[in-house]
Amino acid sequence: MPSTPVLSRRKLLGLGISGGSSLLLGGCALNDLSSSVGDATQPLNERLEALLQGRGPVPLFRPDQVDPAALLINSFNGVPRLDPNSYRLRVDGLVSRPQSLGLAALAALPQHTLVMRHVCVEGWSAIVAWSGVRLADVLSLAGISPLGGYVEISSADQYFSSWDRASALHPQTLLATGMNGAPLPAANGAPVRIATPIKLGYKLSKWVTGLRVASSLGERRGTWEDQGYEWFAGL
């Protein structure tokens, strides 16, 4: 029996029925009215996007399809230079075993390379081969609590984001330490950044230094999310 066709998020966006506050107002809630509508429609859209995301892994690409020149470099507050020898990734909050992980500890965990499409909200995309450890493995090492529904992500450049639990535990969500077969460059988030094909680029924090597991979303949801960008930002 043929499988039931699944509408992609991009098709849904074309129909105007997906995308957080973009359900009615085009994505960036930058005034009082759009903020109110975004608050009202966000739960519906998050459930819809989570449903689509839960249908299975996102198709990946071949290594020969990587286009290094297509990945543009941007930063929120300049490019921080982190000493790889003293770097630590803090994992705390609703976990039973808080962690402070250096690069050697991350390298000791199972490593994965995924050739995926990076999609920017500004309209460009790039196929990149990211390598590193699954975020799920790090959260498992820390003993994430069943009460932990969200993960707050802090970065050395003061960028901030927050994710739902399912997206953080998705098998295609990496804490990347390598890019295109080489160590991750500083300009692209070294020593550790988020990489996944299931979220828009502004959710993929660079220079990650902290993961905090929380039971609910805080008043602060993210650097761009707090300015009206969609919180879930699924693809």
Image (cartoon, rainbow, N blue to C red):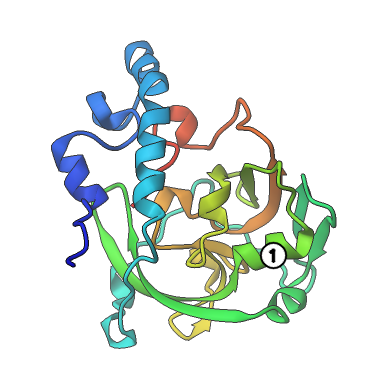
Locate residue 8, reporting x and y percent: 23, 53
Residue 34 visible (yes or no): yes
Q: Which residue is most to the left?
A: 15
- Residue at 17% over, 48% down: 11
Dot 1, crowdedness within 10 Å: few (<14), some or many (≥20)?
many
Task: State the residue at coordinates (18%, 34%).
Answer: 16
Q: Which residue is mark 1?
A: 138
Q: Residue at x 27, y 37 (%)?
A: 18
Task: Tell me if 5 is positioned left or right of 178 in this view.
Answer: left
Q: Visible in this render: residue 228?
A: no
Q: Nearer the viewer, residue 137 or 54?
A: 54
Q: Is 79 situated left or right of 89 in this image?
A: left
Q: Give the residue type at disc 1.
A: Val
Work out which quarter of the rendered image holds the N terminus and state it: bottom left
Left/right placement of residue 184 relative to residue 153 reads left
Looking at the image, how many numbered discs can be counted on the residues?
1
Q: Residue furthest top?
A: 33
* Residue depicted at 54% across the width and 45% down the height: 163
**Looking at the picture, how far across and down is residue 63, in whole percent?**
34, 86
Please provide percent x and percent y for residue 105. Answer: 77, 75
Residue 156, compared with residue 113, is above or below; it is above
The picture places residue 110, in percent across and down from the top left corner, at 64, 80
Query: Quick one: 87 or 171, which is closer to the camera?
Result: 171
- Secondary structure under tag 1 reads helix
Toward the front, the furthest residue is: 1
